[in-house]
Amino acid sequence: MKTLKKASIALCVQAALFSSMSFAQDAAETEAANDGKLEQITVTAQKRTQSIQEVPISVAALSGERFEAMFSGGEDILALSSRVPGLYAESSNGRVAPRFYIRGLGNSDFDLAASQPVSIVMDDVVMENVILKSTPLFDVERVEVIRGPQGTLFGRNTTAGIVKFDTAKPRQDFDAFVEAQLASFGTKNIEGAVGNGITDDLSFRFSFMSQNREDWVTNGYTGEKDAMGGFHEIAGRMQFLYDTGDFSALLNLHTRELDGTSTLFRANAVSKGSNQLNDNYDRETVYYNQGDNNFQKYDADGVSLKLDIELSGSTLTSITAFESADGKGKGDIDGGVAGQLPGFVPFDAVTEDQLDDLKQFSQEIRLASSGTEGYDWQFGAYYFDSSFGVTSIDGFFGATTVFHENYTWAVFGQSSYDITDKLTATGGIRYTYDEKDFRVGDQNVNGFALVIGAAQVQDYEDINVDDGQISWELALNYNLTDDTSLFTRVASGFRAQTIQGRDVAFEGAPSVADAETIESFEVGFKSDLLDDTLRLNAALFWYEIDDIQLSAIGGESQGNRLINADKGTGQGVEIDLEYLVSDNLTLTAGYGYNDTELKDENLRVAPCGSGQCTVTDPIVNGAALIDGNPFPQSPKETFNFTARFSVPMGDDGEFFMFTDWAFQGDTNLFLYESKEFFTDDNYEGGVKIGYENFDHDYTVALFGRNITDRHNIKGGIDFNNNTVFVNDPRIVGVEFKMNFY
């Protein structure tokens, strides 16, 4: 794996530059240009290839330029936030440990052992740990955002939905590309791939990515200029495909190495009674006396093997995968210097978190029908096993290590039946068993609190929890016309019980949340209109969660405890639109509305520990009643828009302009409500202007990300002062891409 990291750039560039060039275009653009119609999109939301218009699920797909433009400035997976109706993402851990939300449902837990109700699936493999969820995106063929519980085919921990990535696969014909960007703050990115047939049955594809940014943030306390803010990330993927027609084997080896800066926390950047950034905030300056410049270093490696065996009228599929990761990050989480600046910081707080020896093994076997007219079915079994340690090092209490193990298995089945030529019914069921174990290692190692007698070594018993649940779904799809279909879906989901041991590092007991279950109903329509130049899809949804798992974060004790609320509800609408106005102009737009509510008359959480925020919830015995509050980090509305306009330049090229925008409405940052810790009207926009040559298949362009240099608050820390963190600055650069065939 280490050799792969170091050799990736050289191998891909050499193979690409010494190959012959020929005319080619992106498949989607070619189809649209040839017949003046929108591209027909296929998805694998039900683990079989189907038209997106035929799947009775609210699903959106991203590919091609619309997807690639988001990452021009070296953005990570968080760039997907608000780019699809109902999808939101944020992180307080830099380029690792993203937190995803679909239809307002997610988990704001920042710990490395956090559980999330949104699953990330990369090349058919579930990335369960939050570090694995941050896997770099490169040479991606398609992204699918599958909204709503997906418990039948994808198992537990999918009560909100799935973000599914499929990378480009090997093929017999030679193809390669290389793409490079130079941009603000010393940003230098390069991505590429090369693939070809080795024999008539064996082919390969090698892909790589390198993203780099120089440090650009000054430490105003030490006077060190360009002390932090940069990153260096490299990733590679080698795939081999053996395909005889009746049998195929796809081997996927992948690796990742990150060395950069974690999230930069900014003390007292909002004033009491306001959620607007104040004069203490300077995007290019922080004031840190601890945290070692908020570094983070992570490595991850993985391998998967997918086997497909064609049998008589069916296909047997086996997917075996192993993932590993480790690393650490550190942060000056009070965001300033105690007693000095910026504003009042009552005490210093610094934390280092380490992920120790993460190992994840998964195995799926399924048998699916192939080519059965009017009736499709599949059934299978799934096994998952993971283990890892998390070490938390606090400047006062010292180091504490806790160990997590998770074992789960499931059996499932799903079938679709054409009741009539127009009406199709789909049903599925899955039984999942999940078991988790937790134990505490050595505690309070060299902690100052232990030395002065403010803490003592605790003796915590091991924790074991287990549960088994049935998930199911029923859906109907009715073809109203050849171009319009109506669908309705009722589904349940299961998110396994969770153990959180972070409070052990601060002399607190570990916490356990019971499993949550969801029942969801949605109805919608999908249509291709105006002679297949306008695609309009929409869905209305409602869901109710019993025993919804929540993370009570912050308060005076800087806690991170798991709790269950009696219920949580959500309702809303999602609209996806794509319009081919002409051969030279394409528009897309998406709108999502989420109305979420916690329902538990007696549930209380600790409000801000700093005393510097204005809590608007009722306070009982110093705790805030949160009944009726929206889910944390649940945008009320999201809106996205893209436009691409082109002008022919001779017979072999075009001049083009592309822009994309994303809007995030009112969002409460914590479980309690306050005047300071919520955001409204956040937005970001991007633009790309360039020239594409069809004969030689290259593109050169100028681009900008966050072109208005918008300063958006993304999250906060409330235990010490009014600390917040913000989005990335404006990035402007030049890009070159060339394909080889």
Image (tube, rainbow, N blue to C red):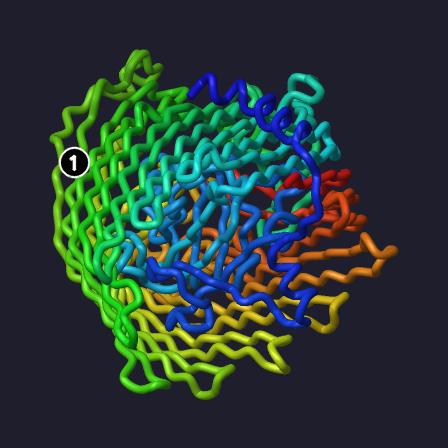
Q: Residue at x 42, y 84 (%)?
A: 479
Question: Which quarter of the rendering shows the N terminus?
Answer: top left
Residue 385 percent location from the top left of the image: 21, 37
User: Circle 1 sits on which residue?
Assistant: 437
Left or right of residue 372, residue 340 in this image: right
> What is the x, y in percent for residue 409?
16, 47
Q: Amino acid at mark 1?
A: Asp
At x 54%, y 31%, the residue is: 208
Residue 678 image point, x, y percent = 53, 55
Residue 326 appears in the figure:
yes
Quadrant (top left/top right/bottom left/bottom right) for the C terminus:
top right
Q: Nearer the viewer, residue 424 or 674?
A: 424
Residue displayed at 41% across by 36% down: 202
Closer to the camera, 323 or 637?
A: 323
Q: Is residue 310 above or below residue 51?
A: above
Q: Position of residue 611 (x, y in %)?
A: 48, 44
